[in-house]
Amino acid sequence: MGYIQHRAILVTASREEQAREAHQKASAICGELVSPLHGPVMNGYYSFAVFPDGSKEDWEESDEGEYHRAQFIAWIDSQRHKDHSTPYDWVEVQYGDEDGLSLIVIDSDAWKRQDKAEASD
């Protein structure tokens, strides 16, 4: 028995070299769960996905998937400039949850919402 909860990461960049760098890093960390790099189709954007590990929560494979996603997110977030801007738009989403809980787990714009909240305090 186990609890099902899918988590995936979507990444978009407007520069091919940056998209390729992020795609290579994701592939090195997350392996076969990384989609091919797609684009550009419109406005020069490139995108790829890191697919869910498919494991049930608290299983070894799920823990490993969580660890790899966290490693990749730490890397992509470390690419921010001093002003917090980033060459990457990204989001980690949760869906297919047995309790029907779909949500954004974390994303590249979280800092903007945090800054706005702190400014309004």
Image: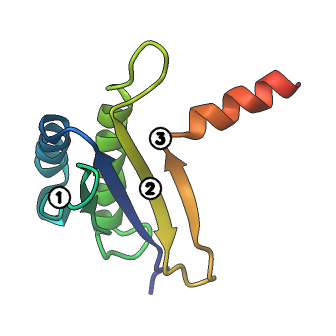
Position of residue 61 measured from the top left corner of the image (x, y, whole percent): 28, 66
Quick one: SS at disc 2? strand
Q: Residues within 10 Å of mark 2 (few under 14, many from 20)?
A: many
Circle nearer the N terminus (2, 3)? 2
Position of residue 57 measured from the top left corner of the image (x, y, whole percent): 44, 70
Q: Are marks 2 and 3 in contact (CB under 8 Å)?
A: no
Quick one: SS at disc 3? loop
Position of residue 68 measured from the top left corner of the image (x, y, whole percent): 28, 49
Identify the residue at the far top of this view: 82
Q: Residue type at mark 1: give it.
A: Gly
For the N terminus, give its image quadrant: bottom left
Q: Residues within 10 Å of mark 3 (few under 14, many from 20)?
A: many
- Relative to 17, say whether 59 is above or below: below
**Foreground of the two, 28 or 18:** 18
Separation of marks 3 and 1 at Cα, in angstroms: 20 Å
Residue receiving disc 3: 108
Q: Nearer the viewer, mark 2 or mark 3?
A: 3
The residue positioned 59% from the left and 65% from the top of the image is 103
